[in-house]
Image (cartoon, grey):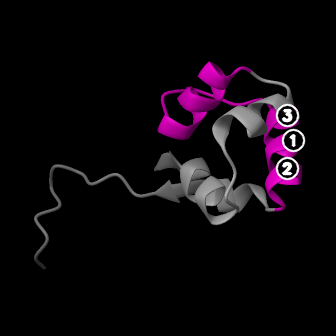
Amino acid sequence: MDIVVRLDVMMAMRKRKGRDLAQEIGISEQNLSLLKSGRVKGIRFETLGRLCAALDCQPGDLLEAVPVPTPNDSGTN
């Protein structure tokens, strides 16, 4: 499984700007941008909690586990 970050979707749904959200949760805009793009290897639970509080959502609204296709997956049975 891969973990896909859906932070950009939730921010759009809540009409939140990156600059304001980053300031509210206490991280840099650059780090928030890295989170939004999924170019991070991990996130602190404290940061995740702050994001959820600021966006009024649950962790599952921000992160999604998606199956990784294997080389044997041809799409037919």
Tell me if residue 23 is in the magenta stretch: no
Q: Which residues are magenta?
A: 28-56
Q: What amino acid does circle 3 point to?
A: Ile
Q: What amino acid does circle 2 point to?
A: Ala
Disc 3 and disc 1 in contact, CB within 8 angstroms: yes
Disc 1 and disc 2 in contact, CB within 8 angstroms: yes
Q: Alpha-carbon distance for marks 3 and 1? A: 6 Å
Element assignment for label 1: helix
- Of 43 and 72, which appears nearest the observer? 43
The dominant secondary structure in magenta is helix
The residue wearing badge 2 is 54
12 left or right, relative to 48: left
**Which of the 4 quarters of the picture holds residue 17?**
top right
The residue wearing badge 1 is 50
Q: Is residue 4 above or below residue 35?
A: below
Q: Is residue 75 above or below residue 30?
A: below
The residue wearing badge 3 is 25
Disc 3 and disc 2 in contact, CB within 8 angstroms: yes
